[in-house]
Amino acid sequence: MAGKAVLAFSGGLDTSVAVGYLREDHGMEVVTVTVDVGQGDDRRRIAAKSKKLGASKHVHVDARREFAREYVVPAIMANALYQEKYCLATALARPLIAKKMLEVAAAEGAVALAHGCSGKGNDQVRFDVALQAGSPLPIIAPVRDMNLDRPAELRFAAERGIHVDDVSKKYSIDQNLWGRAIEGGDLEDPYSEPREDAFEWVRTSGLPDRPTYAVVGFEAGAPVSLDGRAMDTVRLIQLMNLKAGAAGVGIVDHVEDRAVGIKSREVYETPAAICLVEAHKDLEKMVHTKHQTRVKAAVDREWAELAYAGLWDDPLRDDLEGFIRSAQRAVTGRVRLRLFQGGVRVVGRSSPCSLYDARAATYGEGSEFDQRDARGFVRLWGMQTAEANKLKAPARRKA
Ligand code: ARG
């Protein structure tokens, strides 16, 4: 196929192999696109690498603010933790990268879209679904199309003189503002403990012997300040990552169900995500009624499933977010976190929208609640349970 292919490019093994494949096996001109979602890569190194691989053009898009505001903040509002653990860092970035690819493809008059994902993971699903929702162009995924495993990719790279960094030989890393995923190598044995050198964001030894505290301020569900200082979301997340990571907070290690059915052992460093979701969820419980809390948890779970499975563009997300947004109106206040030796705990919360009433809750003097009001309620509350238990006793069973 002649013409231009727009390739999502990180400079890693998969996408480097992809450039070679598109050029040599497809005879295409390659435009590489790197979307900055806070992965902290060296911009010039990636551009140079793209050039060295023979791409005709490299486009860099700084999407950090957009990522934080349009993708991460909604995830915080949804307390998004897939299977109770994973903050969706990679999952949230893919639809945004796809969106930027489509913009570049339109500007460049491309005839194909390409990404470096394998046929085993979630990212192919997320890219393909987002790309096909926005464009009829064919999608080329060289690693998937050639059924390459990692050794085959390394051979492919070696044959073509494609340089591979040391770290990408040991682990496969995907990182952005919201988290860092570490996969492959010795981690593929789910019983093997991650080595210290797998971690870059979270301190694993020599931790401080005193707790540190962080106060997160929320406004209508979005984090807006840290330790009393108002700041933009990107900065806030970066600082929270540093602060919690320094206290050893943020490592997640679990077995995850991929959208494609395969189970995978995943190790993450997500200090800010763990803290901000924990804080947000805690504040919600103070300002929501018990009925809101119950339904919110169910909606949140659906939101996380949808985002994980690459269905960001499904109208169901709008529907769920209608509820979530409405539920955020009262989520204003601040939450105090204690960070110590790898653990995080909420130790204080306060809100102008709090439904907590100390005078109702107190066991001390001065309660405004007359305990005698409770009797009728409790009798009705337990009535059906009492009836059912009467039927269980054989001697008393009605004829
Ligand atoms: N399991 C996570 C996910 O599906 C992280 C995957 C990161 N790895 C990668 N190659 N992109 O979102």
Image (cartoon, rainbow, N blue to C red):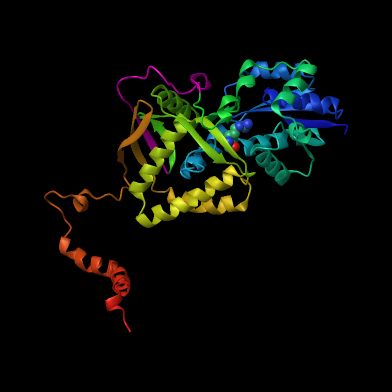
Numbered label tally: 0
Q: Position of residue 268 (x, y in %)?
A: 51, 30
- 290 sits to left or right of 148: left
Q: Position of residue 88 (x, y in %)?
A: 54, 38
Q: Which residues are magenta?
A: 195-220
Quarter of the image holding residue 4?
A: top right
Camera-side residue of 17 and 75 = 17
- 370 sits to left or right of 233: left
Q: Quadrant of the C terminus?
A: bottom left
**Which residue shows up at 61% across the image and 21% down it?**
170
Camera-side residue of 269 and 348 = 269
Q: Position of residue 152 (x, y in %)?
A: 74, 25
Quarter of the image holding residue 216?
A: top left
Quarter of the image holding residue 274?
A: top left
Residue 105 seen anywhere in this rendered image of the structure = yes
**Which residue shows up at 32% across the image and 74% down it?**
391
Q: Position of residue 383 (x, y in %)?
A: 28, 71
Reply above or below: 92 against 47: below
Ligand 1 position by quadrant = top right
Residue 210 highlighted magenta (yes or no) = yes
**Which residue shows up at 50% across the image and 29% down it?**
234
- 61 sits to left or right of 198: right
